[in-house]
Image (cartoon, rainbow, N blue to C red):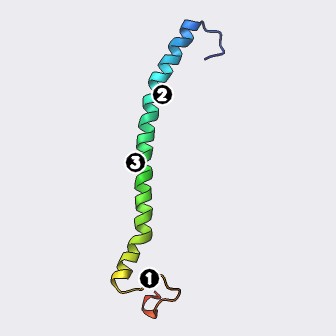
Amino acid sequence: MYVVGLDVDTRAYFTAATLIIAVPTDIAFHDTYYVVAHFHYVLRVNLTFFPQHFLGLQGMPRRISDYPDAFAG
């Protein structure tokens, strides 16, 4: 729209209209993206470390290179 030979006032109008539409849409997208990204992060962390919680409750030792046979499965 900027290279079609519109006069300055028409270009200003379309520029303002584009910003009025684009900025709130971008803000809503980033807010939604943040919530979704945060949910995926929490999900990944819980899927990774929550099983270790139950293994710890069963007595599995931490930070060793070889575990007892009871935890081999």
Q: Name the disc covering residue 54, or none.
A: none
Residue visible at 43% across and 64% down in the picture: 45
Where residue 62 is drawn, which disc sits there? 1
Q: Position of residue 27 (x, y in %)?
A: 43, 35
Which is in the foreground here, disc 1 or disc 2?
1
Tell me: residue 52, above or below residue 68: above
What residue does disc 3 label?
Answer: 35
Q: Position of residue 67 (x, y in %)?
A: 48, 89
Amino acid bearing label 3? Val
Question: 73 or 62: which is nearer to us?
Answer: 62
Placement of the N terminus among the 4 image quadrants: top right
Q: Is residue 5 above or below residue 48?
A: above
- The residue that appears at 65% across and 13% down in the rendered structure is 4
Task: In the rendered view, tell whether residue 29 sits above or below residue 36.
Answer: above
Q: Residue at x 44, y 32 (%)?
A: 25
User: Which amino acid, mark 1?
Assistant: Arg
Q: CA distance from mark 3 to mark 1?
A: 33 Å
Residue 29 picture location, percent across and down: 44, 38
Q: Residues within 10 Å of mark 1 (few under 14, many from 20)?
A: few
Q: Quadrant of residue 44?
A: bottom left
Element carrying mark 1: loop
Does dot 3 land on a helix, a strand or a loop?
helix
Percent from the top left, x then y, of residue 13? 50, 12
Q: Residues within 10 Å of mark 2 (few under 14, many from 20)?
A: few
Q: Earlier in the sequence, mark 3 or mark 1?
A: 3
Amino acid tagged 2: Ala
Q: Secondary structure at mark 2?
A: helix
Vertical position of residue 16 compared to residue 72: above or below: above
**Mark toward the start of the polypeptide (2 vs 3):** 2
Which numbered marker is on residue 22? 2
